[in-house]
Amino acid sequence: MKKILIAICGGLILSSCTWIKVTSKGEGVRLVQSVRTVESCKKLGQVNTKVESKVIVFNRDADKVSAELADLARNEAALMGGDTIVPISEITEGRRSFGVYQCFAARTQ
């Protein structure tokens, strides 16, 4: 019984950690909540993201799941040449879709 309790507690502690890291390119992508913000932008497509929303039988913190989904979307949007993402779906079972837009002039390196 003690081992099971330790395993569950360990799982809960690990579930509070953020495992998704924003890449250097992803840092240049902003997250906006309103489609109105991107009305004058060029739509490049969409990305579908997924993270684990449960550990064993416990639901992970909704804010952490949301942040990890956005971080994944920022990384993917950067690879597509986007600089802005907008959520276009609700979070369901650890999944969310984002619209990818280019709102600013492309930067030259």
Image (tube, rainbow, N blue to C red):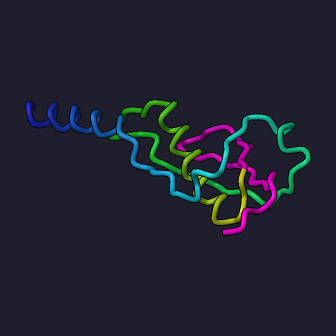
Vertical side of 97 occupied by 90: above or below: above
- Residue 50 at what x, y percent from top left? 54, 51
| Residue 8 spot, x, y in % from top left | 23, 34
Furthest-bottom residue in view? 109
Count of labels in the image: 0
Residue sitting at the far front: 109
- Using residue 62 as the reference point, say whether residue 36 is left or right of it: right
Furthest residue in direction right, as rendered: 40
Q: Is residue 104 left or right of residue 74?
A: right
Residue sitting nearer the eye, 35 or 57:
35
Residues 100 and 59: in front is 100
Of residue 58 and residue 104, the one placed in the foreground of this image is 104
In the rendered view, would you say 28 is above or below 36? below
**Start and end of the magenta stretch?**
84-109
Left of 51 or right of it: where is 101? right
Which residue does the image show at 56% across and 46% down from the upper left? 69
**Image-based side of 104 in relation to 30, left or right:** right
Q: Where is residue 63 in the image (x, y as percent from the top left)?
A: 51, 31
Residue 16, quarter of the rendered image:
top left
Which residue sits at x=72%, y=38%?
32
Screen quadrant of the N terminus:
top left
Specify whether residue 93 is painted magenta. yes
For image coordinates 67% across by 37% down, the residue present is 90
Residue at 66 percent across and 69 percent down: it is 109
Q: In the rendered image, which quarter is residue 46 located in?
A: bottom right
In the rendered image, residue 82 lying in the magenta stretch gets the answer no
Where is residue 70? Give x, y as percent. Answer: 59, 45
